[in-house]
């Protein structure tokens, strides 16, 4: 092999190919059936999503990536039932769903723990909503806290925890309600790089141990490749499925894999895709080549 | 000492010591100003209190007159070679000294009704407290639930809030005659005025507070399976409770301002009646003592409620910093 000749991201190693085949055999937990979403404002209409068609298999880990404003958040909010579809529908275990429900847990980007409840009571919330007794809910909540490694913070209040810990509690809270699908919208993007990597490993560890299907939104390509079985790439204006990528990395994943050729190939491909969308955006927020900064102060020394 | 300087920076942080210093000064400075005006004759004292009328027959001892008039009377008597009137510099009768007010204040708790009043200050004040209590309780029993419902049910808000907004602008005194006609002349119409004065504000203020609850928390709880009454009692109400509590403290202040109107309709009563009556007899020391009682009671309750609030809602304070 010549130096830096990356493999094709589409050629899966044998173990990964086998795993993808296994996943394909499983039934769909979550189906997105020709979903479209139009935001009608006073003057104009924004087509946020158009004819999205996708199915998530049981115990699959799917990441959704795409440039800013392509409708990722809109999609996951529709999946959670927090936003209504304009066309199409969402099915969970083959049954159409309407509005939010405990079968689809969500971890938000913002910290959304209930600030008036301590950590344990936060985790108990969903269990109690399901009709469990207080004592039973407490017992289960403590187990979930153990899963995320925070049982010694059971009586702390959310504001006493760091951002990473809060998101771990949020994951425990969502999982404790026993959802079929866990939806996550850039849940780690507010965390620093080390904490984020730790959280990613935590999440994969939890996912390995329990029967949960995860749809994870991110704008961080490394994160998407590191976590996902399949990556759904959305293109903007209107938001449509551009490509579905099967990640050619074997499991369990290690941080070292981020240096592997498969990883780099996938990343290069994704970057190319996203860059190709960049031209279509009116706001040139990804300002790259030719933007000039007016001289604001007189600089006497050379920086480079 | 750093805290003292920082206290004067915009949004600066104060420390415990400087907070204490400012707290003491907040009471002391107005008292010092009042004492200066009362006890240092050169500060103001625009009048003369006659101690001996001398030869002038229209003067009486105990009378107050302007300094100019007094010196005219003196020079007149001097030119007539009669005994000159004597007097000391004094403030107008409506500005008694702190000492006099303090005496009246102490008297208020030790003696019975002063001249011209059928009740002592404390009795009158007790009656006022009762009116406020019932008025605010009734208003809250309706206003708090209705406000929370308006804030969380858009349909109800559209239905109720326009008419509430209409009534809010009608001055409560306008309902005075009506209240008396319907409810008689005793306490009922007074309580009604307090209710009318606070209720409409209360509904709107609390509806707004409810609407301001972080919507992300509502969404999070929905994805955990909360809806209907569970959503209301497990998320909405605990979430707004600290702000609701603060609203209630402010609204209690509103109730006090309507007390003045309430107590002057029907058979006048309570602390307002006491004050007007004593002012008519020019017992301004009693007037100020009564005012001081209202102020101290108001400040006291608010401080106690504030402390309790900080105990109950520690999480809120930590978040807001
Ligand atoms: N409530 C709304 N009303 C009107 N337009 C909306 C609304 N929410 C989203 N949009 C529009 O829909 C499009 C998709 O928005 P969305 O928030 O889903 O993007 P996103 O992919 O999550 O972006 P980002 O990566 O920046 O979070 C955008 O053009 C946005 O302006
Ligand atoms: Mg988004």
Image (tube, coloured by chain):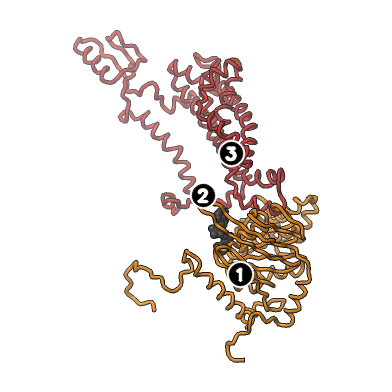
Label 1 beta carbon less than 8 Å to ligand 1: no
Residue beneath the point at 74% across and 81% down: A15
Which quarter of the picture shows residue A5? Answer: bottom right
What tint does the image give chain B? red
Residue wearing tag 3: B206
Foreground disc of the pair 3, 1: 1
Q: Secondary structure at mark 3?
A: helix
- Same subunit, labels 1 and 2: the answer reads yes
What tint does the image give chain A? orange
Residue B85 appears left or right of B158: left
Marks 3 and 1 in Cβ contact (< 8 Å): no
Label 1 vs label 2: CA separation? 30 Å
Label 3 vs label 2: CA separation? 30 Å
- Tag 2: Cα neighbours inside 10 Å, few (<14), some, or many (≥20)? few
- Tag 1: Cα neighbours inside 10 Å, few (<14), some, or many (≥20)? some
Q: Chain of mark 2?
A: A
Residue A129 appears left or right of B14: right
Q: How many marks?
A: 3
Residue wearing tag 2: A42
Q: Position of residue A246 (x, y in %)?
A: 68, 75
Q: Chain of mark 1?
A: A
Which quarter of the picture shows residue A244? Answer: bottom right
Residue A147 appears left or right of B95: right
Residue wearing tag 1: A242
- Tag 3: Cα neighbours inside 10 Å, few (<14), some, or many (≥20)? many
Q: Chain of mark 3?
A: B
Marks 1 and 2 in Cβ contact (< 8 Å): no
Q: Position of residue B248 (x, y in %)?
A: 58, 37
- Same subunit, labels 3 and 1: the answer reads no
- Comparing B79 with A167, the one in front is A167
């Amino acid at each position: 092999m010549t130096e830096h000749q990356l493999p094709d991201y589409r050629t899966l190693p044998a173990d990964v190919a086998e795993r993808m085949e296994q996943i394909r055999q499983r039934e769909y937990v979550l189906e997105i059936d020709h979903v479209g979403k139009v935001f009608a404002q006073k003057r104009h209409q924004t087509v946020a999503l158009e004819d999205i068609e996708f199915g998530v298999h049981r115990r699959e880990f799917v990441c959704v990536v795409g440039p800013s404003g392509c409708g990722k958040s809109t999609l996951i909010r529709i999946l959670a039932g927090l936003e209504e579809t304009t066309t199409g529908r969402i099915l969970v275990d083959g049954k159409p769903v309407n509005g939010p429900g405990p079968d689809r847990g969500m971890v938000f980007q913002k910290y959304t723990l209930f600030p008036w409840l301590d950590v344990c009571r936060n985790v108990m919330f969903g269990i109690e909503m399901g009709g469990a007794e207080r004592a039973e809910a407490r017992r289960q909540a403590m187990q979930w806290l153990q899963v995320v490694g925070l049982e010694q913070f059971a009586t702390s209040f959310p504001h006493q925890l760091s951002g990473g810990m809060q998101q771990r509690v949020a994951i425990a809270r969502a999982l404790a309600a026993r959802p079929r699908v866990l939806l996550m919208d850039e849940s780690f993007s507010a965390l620093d790089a080390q904490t984020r990597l730790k959280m990613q490993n935590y999440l994969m560890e939890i996912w390995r141990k329990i029967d949960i299907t995860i749809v994870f939104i991110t704008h961080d390509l490394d994160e998407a490749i590191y976590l996902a079985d399949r990556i759904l790439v959305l293109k903007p204006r209107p938001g449509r499925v551009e490509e579905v990528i099967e990640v050619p990395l074997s499991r369990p994943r290690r941080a070292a894999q981020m240096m592997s050729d498969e990883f780099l190939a996938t990343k290069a491909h994704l970057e190319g895709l996203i860059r190709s969308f960049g031209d279509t955006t009116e706001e040139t927020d990804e300002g790259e080549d030719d933007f000039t900064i007016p001289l604001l102060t007189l600089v006497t020394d050379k920086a480079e | 000492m750093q805290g003292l300087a920082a206290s004067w920076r915009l949004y600066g942080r104060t420390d415990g010591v400087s907070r204490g210093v400012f707290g003491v000064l907040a009471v002391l400075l107005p008292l010092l100003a009042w004492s200066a005006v009362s006890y240092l004759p050169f500060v103001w004292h625009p009048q003369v209190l006659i101690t001996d009328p001398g030869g002038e027959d229209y003067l009486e001892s105990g009378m107050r007159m302007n300094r100019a008039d007094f010196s005219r009377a003196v020079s007149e008597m001097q030119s007539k070679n009669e005994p000159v009137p004597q007097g000391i510099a004094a403030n107008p009768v409506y500005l008694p000294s702190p000492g006099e007010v303090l005496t009246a204040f102490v008297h208020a708790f030790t003696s019975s009704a002063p001249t011209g009043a059928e009740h002592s200050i404390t009795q009158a004040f007790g009656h006022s407290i009762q009116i406020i209590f019932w008025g605010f309780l009734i208003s809250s029993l309706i206003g708090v639930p209705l406000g929370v419902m308006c804030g969380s049910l858009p349909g109800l808000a559209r239905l109720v809030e326009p008419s509430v907004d209409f009534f809010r602008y009608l001055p409560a005194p306008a309902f005075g005659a009506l209240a008396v006609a319907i409810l008689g002349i005793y306490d009922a119409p007074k309580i009604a005025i307090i209710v009318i004065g606070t209720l409409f504000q209360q509904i709107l203020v609390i509806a707004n507070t409810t609407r301001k609850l972080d919507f992300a928390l509502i969404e999070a709880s929905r994805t955990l399976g909360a809806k209907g009454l569970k959503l209301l009692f497990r998320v909405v109400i605990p979430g707004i409770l600290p702000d609701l509590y603060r609203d209630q403290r402010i609204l209690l202040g509103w109730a006090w301002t309507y007390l003045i109107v309430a107590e002057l309709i029907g058979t006048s009563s309570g602390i307002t009646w006491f004050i007007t009556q004593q002012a008519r007899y020019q017992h301004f020391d009693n007037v100020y003592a009564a005012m001081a009682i209202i102020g101290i009671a108001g400040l006291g309750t608010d401080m106690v409620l504030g402390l309790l609030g900080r105990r109950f809602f520690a999480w809120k304070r930590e978040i807001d910093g």
